[in-house]
Image (tube, rainbow, N blue to C red):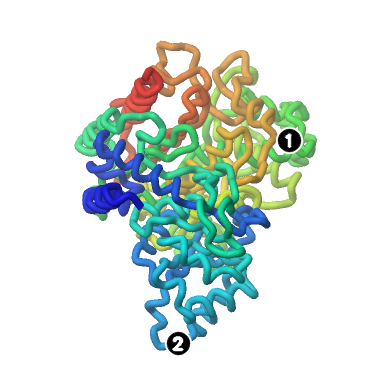
Amino acid sequence: MNYKLFMYKNNLVQTIAVCFLAISTFSACAQEHQKNEELLKVNSNILQHTVLLNNQNSIIPLTELEKKNIASVSLGFAFQNVSDSLLNKYAKVTSFSSASYENSPELGKLENDLKFFNTIIISITDQEAPKARYINFINSIAKSKSVIIALYGQQTNLAPFDSLTAPILWSQDKNIQAASLIPQLIFGGIAAGNKLTRNISARFPAGSGYTTTVTRLKYTIPEDAGVNAENLREIDDITAEAIAARAAPGMVVLVAKDGKVIFNKAYGTHTYDGPADKVTDIFDLASITKITATTPMVMRLVEQNKLKLDTNIGAYIALARPTAMNDIPVREVMLHQAGFIPYIPFHDGVKPGDHSPDSSAAYPTKVADGYFIRKDYFKDVMWPQMLNAPIRTRGKYVYSDISMYVMKDIAEQISGEHLNDYVAENFYAPLGMQTAGFLPRNRFSKDRIIPTENDTYFRKTLLVGYVHDQGAALVGGVSGHAGLFASTNDMAIMFQMLLNKGTYGGQQYFKPQTVDTFTAQQSNISRRGLGFDRWDPNLSKKYPSATASPQTYGHTGYTGTAVWVDQARGLIYVFLSNRVNPSVTNKLVSMGIRSRIQEVINSAIDKGMEK
């Protein structure tokens, strides 16, 4: 390595180490344009001296994540925490370190602890690679597992791996920056393409090296997408204004541009006297459920020709046939033009005998801590009310939650699967979305979930991990219009797949024309797509923001959430908050917080494109 470059890079490490450790929060240091430009040069040099070997079976980038149980093993690598933080943005990865097995000379105990994992990512430096203890461990584990080696340091130490057929990612650098880049090569956030420049061994001659393509999100800094970080600073001011005005106790903002996550920052606290928000926190998405769960399920069924948009509701729901719903086409339901009334306050009709503080066979449906609804309450009370509700405004655009109760039932009738199971199996697991799903309390500790309302009128408790929407809660937390929880990163993954016209991670989830059809304006009386909300052509409404392009689609959520995809800018904007804590306030809307942040992002991107 060039000595001056070596010294420059190692001096720079001290300045930017904190930035890499906080790669998801983008602290003030990562917002400084000049430092970011320098960092890009350093990263570019690292990648120029990184080579993918032994990828003859195209294992890298990893695919079919739903079939993989992944472990990360450090064999003396100092920056495993950085590497693992990046790995875990793509899939759930469990960490192990040889330092914890000092009393196991041949690492047999470590090998035993890996028995339930089928994919092992091993990080090792050039100094450790020649050690027989580590080579024996690697050769042994590779007999029964899919192994990937991340080798950091001098390339001459590739020689000990001559007998290994598993993929090897070799990086000349063994520092914190390299530790943040190699995981992204493994998952396809960054493409490989370099070759060895010298002969190492018979197995690794000069010219060896495999090429890959980008298949997933990259986690980087604004300048990597042509955006000046300084032009995003106003996001900090707007969020501070929102919190000071008690529009919401906290929020997380994510920006992805051209397949690169360039901003993901948490602000405020869980509650006004609670712990600080983190970018990994899980939020109640409210109506974003409609386009992240129910609509994708509908899209898949339409694509499979199992569901026809112009077929009437009664063809799919037997109980609708004697009602006014019978003759309404599915398309009108998806466009909110079916004439359904907007909302039924189901919780107002709950009688004392309908609920219990304890679970039992008679009261099996959990609504919140200490609140269980009686068996078949939805089937006996709620569903008949919806089926028999008056149809008053058919042919007009009237936004109604009932539409997605109906679509959930149709989709489940056709597929024979529950909505929550279907989307987890078909979308979330293969995409690598780790937090997205219904009923988060069944999967995560309370401290990872952002509280919503302190419900003083219905459930009489602070809601943490139980859906805020009362109707969705009475159903048991899984509904077509609300109930989904997720982090910003999972939202970025899902909507990058849609921005990619249906592909992500080397897998196709939808045909491009399916994505185009559902996300484009499909109504001649409203701005709506099929399930998706969209940019409003009435410019006086400035919706979703004054500068959003006509190619923008997404949705907002009652709890204070929003996700917008601006195809013209290659942009995904995610805003998650709990504006209903401790009680419902409209300040987030009246202050225009979400739209103002979107305008800052749009302006920053547009300035970058003008260069």
Q: Position of residue 601 (x, y in %)?
A: 36, 28
Q: Is residue 532 visible?
A: yes
Q: Compared to 370, does 160 lie above or below?
A: below
Identity, as a three-letter code, of the amino acid under mark 1: Val
Which residue does the numbered mark 1 point to in the structure image?
Answer: 302
Q: Compared to 371, does 491 lie above or below?
A: above
Q: Is residue 113 left or right of residue 457?
A: right
Identity, as a three-letter code, of the amino acid under mark 2: Pro
Residue at x 62%, y 53% (from the top left corner): 63
SS type, badge 1? helix
Mark 1 crowdedness (10 Å alpha carbons): few <14, some 14-19, many ≥20:
some
Q: Is residue 560 left or right of residue 233?
A: right
SS type, badge 2? loop
Residue that lies at the very extreme toward the left in this rendered image? 244
Q: Position of residue 300 (x, y in %)?
A: 70, 40
Q: Earlier in the sequence, mark 2 or mark 1?
A: 2
Give the foreground label among 2 and 1.
Answer: 2
Label placed on residue 354? none
Closer to the camera, 28 or 478? 28
Q: Quadrant of residue 145?
A: bottom right
Label placed on residue 105? 2
Q: Is residue 377 visible?
A: no
